[in-house]
Image (cartoon, rainbow, N blue to C red):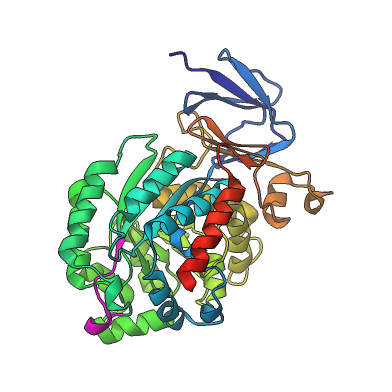
Amino acid sequence: MTTSTLWIQNPLAIFTANDANADGGLVVRGQEIVELVAKGQTPMIPVDSVYDASESVVLPGLVNVHHHFYQTLTRAHPDALNKRLFPWLKTLYPVWANLQEKQLEVASTLAMAELMLSGCTTTSDHHYVFTDGLESAIDIQLQAAKRLGMRTHLTRGSMSLGEEQGGLPPQNTVQTEETILADSERLIKTYHDADDGAMTRIALAPCSPFSVTEDLMRETARMAEAYDVRLHTHLAETEDENNFCLRMFGLRPLDYLEKVDWLNHRTWLAHGIHFNDEEIARLGQAGVGISHCPSSNMVLASGICRGLELEAAGCAVGIGVDGSASNDCSNMIEELRQAMLIQRLRYQADEMTHLTALSWGTTGSAACLGRNDIGEIAVGKQADLALFKLNELRFSGAGDLLAALVLCGAHQVDRLMVAGQWRVKDGTLLDLDVEALMQSHGMGAHHLVT
């Protein structure tokens, strides 16, 4: 079988995430980038076809490092509006406990479709609801991702500390540690691909300090080391969580994380807002990644992640859209804009730039996932690309075209390539009936909440 070679020619603007010169475009062979072309030059490699990108701003495919696909079914849920994190969770746990397989399938498909249309080529998801009848949740999500052609890092979440043990979740949403660990091992052995260019990887993700036991955290860390997979959890999202950890464990969240053997380079954390100076230094020394989730942090009034300080300390900082019950949309390019804006409430405008936001959504997010084959446009990297056109009223008169994507509010790609294959053309997902999906998703949401 012959592998074709494509020149994506003369982009209107390009962000390589590494300062490389690719103003003349790039050449893709198979699923890899094989050449960068300087402005006014032609490829040294013979090409089979050309795509004219002269109306497109080209980015590396964006990488989403925190999400809850299933929560698209509870967007703007009336009973959960205008609540802080813990009351918000207590309101929604009983709703999520009714989740069924078909609902999860359509919710996952819709979340990934939304992400892809917003320029995202790789996504993580944190699924932790495994009620009776939903034991194959990760398998269902993986099949949905395969149909869409999206690159995924799916995390086997878990809850084992129910209300009866002093935790937050209701008892019908928790599993035994034995069940959780057995399924975690099954998923790693069945699906995890450690090779460069992998479309599917598995990580282990006990939900949070207020929903799992210490023993589960330790055993999960041991399994992650044994199988060389990554670890993920929510941490230091709110002051309420900090206070819970002090009451429950006698420790602040980061001290608890260290106690259960999670303070290491395998770990990336969702939110990571309420760390002090000493804790930021420890996180950086350990090489822990942080998923900044700006929209969710604003909706729940959780606070502002100390992103620049975490990055300066040595942490990879990436971007996560978070679940739709606390963000209410899964738009990755819009999330980069939110990240820049909220960070400017903590830092100066010349410190938190549009380029910083773009780097967090590409190379920073890739580093959170432990990947060096995605997140930038360079020879040998995966051909994951997002192409945006600036032909809307919002972009008229824009000077700096990369800045315009962030400042003017880009929201949808014209084209998306994953592993060398076009998955979106002319703003339309290929091989997906979006109207039918929305109808099924709407019905699923209605049945879940009634």
**Nearer the observer, 17 or 8:** 8
- Residue 404 is situated, as x and y percent measured from the top left of the image, at 72, 51
Q: Is residue 255 left or right of residue 235?
A: left
Q: Quadrant of residue 332?
A: bottom right
- The picture places residue 386, in percent across and down from the top left corner, at 60, 40
The answer to whether any part of residue 277 appears in the image is yes
Classify residue 194 by image quadrant: top left
Does residue 97 lie above or below 316 as drawn? below
Answer with left or right where residue 167 lies relative to residue 66: left
Reply yes or no: does residue 160 show up in magenta: yes
Counting from the top left corner in percent of width and height, residue 31 is at: 47, 28
Q: Residue at x 48, y 72 (%)?
A: 449
- Numbered label tally: 0
Residue 252 placement, left or right of 21: left
Percent x, y of residue 87: 44, 83
Q: Is residue 101 left or right of residue 331?
A: left
Camera sees residue 374: no
Which region shows up in magenta? 157-167
- Residue 387, compared with residue 138, is above or below; it is above
User: Which residue appears at 75% of the width and 47% of the height?
Assistant: 400
Q: Residue most toward the right?
A: 397
- At 41% across and 40% down in the image, what residue appears? 372
Check the image and report above or below for 81 versus 283.
below
